[in-house]
Amino acid sequence: MDAQVGRAIAAVGVVLALIAIWIDAVAGQSYWDVDGTVGAFLLIMVILAGLALVGAFMGQAAGAYRALLTIGAVLVGFYGFFPAALATDQWSILDAGGWLGLCGGALITVGALIMLMPARGETRTMAAAAGPPMGAMLAGLGLVLCFIALWVKVDNGGGSYWNAPNLGHSLGVVMLIALILSAVGLVGVVMMRMAPAAGLAALGGLIACGLFIFIPVGDAFNDLGQMRAGAWLGFFGGLLLAIGVVMLSKSVATTAAHTTTTAPAATAPPAATA
C-alpha cells in the first residue's frame, strides 16, 4: 500500500512539473520563455522522472525509486531557485508556474521517499552505514567547492549567491541550509555509522545541486562569458556533491540489503540431556 501511495504522489508531481515548464513562472514569463536551455533541461528531467515512474509501476523497484528521488530532489532545487531568490520581498512577481514546478519536484521527492521507506519492523544496522571512501570523498569535495561558491562573484554584475544585487540573502540562506543538511548527513554516515543519514546527505546534496546548476544551465549556450568563479565553483561542486551522495546512498542500501540477507539465522538452544 505504501508503494502505491508513493507512486500516485510521484505521478502527480511529474504532471505538475511538466505543466510548469510552459506556464508563466516569473514576471509573466514561463521557464521555456526565460531561456530555451532551462526549458529543455526541465523537459529532459521530467521525461526521465516519467520513465523512472513507469519502471516503478513495472516492478523495477529499487533502481526506479532511487532515480525518482534523485531527479525529484534536483528539480526541487532547480525549480526552487526563483522562489528562493525572490523570497525577501519580491514573491509578488512569481506566477503560478514558479510554484507549480516547486510543488511538482517536491511531490516526486516525497513519493520516492515513501516508496523507499523500509518495511514495518525492518531494522537497519549501524555497521551497514560505513559507505565507500570514493563517494564520501566526492561529496566532501563538492561541499567545499559549494561553500566557497556562496561568497564568490557569480557574474559580471558583481553579486554572489549570498549577496545578489537587489535580492538580499534569501538565495544564499537556502543554499547554505541545503549544504549544511548534506554535511550533517555525510558526517552521520561516515563518522557515526548511521545508515538513515545517507538519505539526509542525498536529499540536501541533490537540492543544493539543483540550485547551483540553475545559472550555468541558463547561460550554457549564449552567456557563458558572463559567468565568474562563483558560478563555475558552484556548478562543478554541485555535480560532485550530487554524484558523491548518490554513490554513498546506493552503497549504504546495497550493504544493508546484503547484511539482511546474509545475517546468520538464530540457532535453537541445545536440547537438555537426561
Image (tube, grey):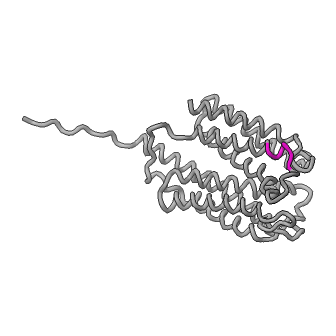
The x and y percentages for residue 164 are 83, 66
The residue lying at 67 percent from left, 62 percent from top is 142
The residue lying at 82 percent from left, 37 percent from top is 19
**Residue 4 is covered by the magenta coloring:** no
**Residue 96 is covered by the magenta coloring:** yes
**Residue 137 versus residue 92 in the image, above or below:** below
Which is nearer the eye, 214 or 254? 214
Which is nearer the eye, 27 or 2? 27
The x and y percentages for residue 158 are 87, 71
Residue 67 visible in rendering:
no
Which is nearer the eye, 215 or 82? 82
Left/right placement of residue 216 relative to residue 75 reads: right
The x and y percentages for residue 12 are 72, 34
Q: In which quarter of the image is residue 235?
A: bottom right
The span shown in magenta is 94-99
The residue lying at 79 percent from left, 57 percent from top is 87
The x and y percentages for residue 247 are 60, 52
Q: Main secondary structure of the magenta part?
A: helix
Quadrant where the N terminus lies?
top right
Q: In which quarter of the image is residue 225?
A: bottom right
Q: Residue furthest left?
A: 274
Residue 86 visible in rendering:
yes
Numbered-mark total: 0
Left/right placement of residue 201 relative to residue 233 reads: left
The residue lying at 79 percent from left, 42 percent from top is 100
Which is nearer the eye, 78 or 103? 103
**Residue 145 versus residue 24 in the image, above or below:** below
Left/right placement of residue 2 relative to residue 67 reads: left
